[in-house]
Amino acid sequence: MNKIRPWVLAETNYGDVKQQTYDVAVVPLGATEPHNLHLPYGTDIFEANEVSQRICQYAHSRGGSVVTLPAIPFGTETNLSEFPLAINLNPSTLHAVLEDIVDSLTDSGIQKIVLLNSHGGNDLKPFLREMAGTTSAHLFLCNWYQAIGDVYFDLFEHAEDHAGEMETSFALAYFPNLVATNEDGSLAADEGKTRPMRFAALNEGWVSITRPWHLLTTNSGAANPHQATADKGRRMMEILEERLGGFLLELAESELDETFPF
């Protein structure tokens, strides 16, 4: 029988929760969208839950009073609207959902809240700015994939945009049964090549747009996944656990005074 993990809210019961005082709540954010031909539509959901649960376990095992909510399964998908069943929440809708969640957490006495984002389309910095001064909670935003930026190319050969080597390595390590393969065991994926835009300013990043994914990609993949391995995914997770789990522990132990978080 599996043991209840007290840092995972969905697994706990009221008998336990009413005896706890949580210092930090983690709100994972995912999305439901295609990831090339080989990864499941729920990739961002599975990633968000896996990372949040593991970093909370890291903090909990060292005495941190932390809890993670279930991942929000939908995100902003306006740039993938031409792909079937890419389930969209407009930014204003997503912000409204988050505001209600933050209110629920503060009603429960939690003043330190981490938004753990797993989907590049979820632009949440404006939400933090809008909430500043309107909530008693201290909000922190973490796009977990940015936490490995300085060591990314120590782990992976190809840059990541969407459904590439990094995400596929994650999937091979933690939900391999959902990765589609060919009869020879190779990934059932294309190479994730993207189409260059006609303006140099866009290609160089001086000017930006919301990219129409059906024109940018062939099958929604925007990075090469074929060098992915489960070992790379596990090595990445070790770094995330230490870095983000360490942050949660430090956050949980930090006093809420008049100069917090300084």
Image (cartoon, rainbow, N blue to C red):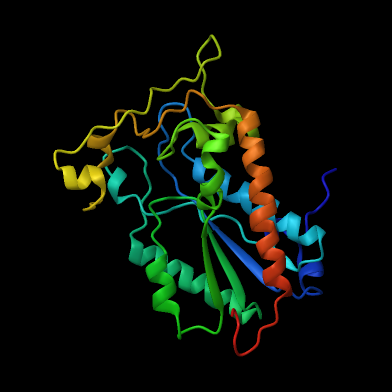
User: Which residue occupies 65% across, 77% down?
Assistant: 110
Q: Position of residue 135 (x, y in %)?
A: 50, 83
Numbered-mark total = 0
Please state, as top left, top right, bottom left or bottom right, where the N terminus lies in the image.
top right
Q: Residue 205, position in %: x, y? A: 26, 49
> In which quadrant is the C terminus drawn?
bottom right
Image vertical order of residue 29 relative to residue 38, above or below? below
Residue 211 in sight in this render = no
| Figure quadrant of residue 218 | top left
> For the point 14% across and 42% down, which residue is it?
199
> Against 201, is 162 above or below?
above
Q: Residue furthest left?
A: 198
252 lies left or right of 36 = right
Classify 63 as above or below 130.
above
Answer above or below: position of 116 versus 133.
above
Residue drawn 53% across the image and 10% down it? 183
Residue 243 seen: yes
Q: Going by the image, does 207 lie left or right of 114?
A: left
Residue 214: image quadrant is top left
- Considering every residue shown, the one lying at the far top of the view is 184
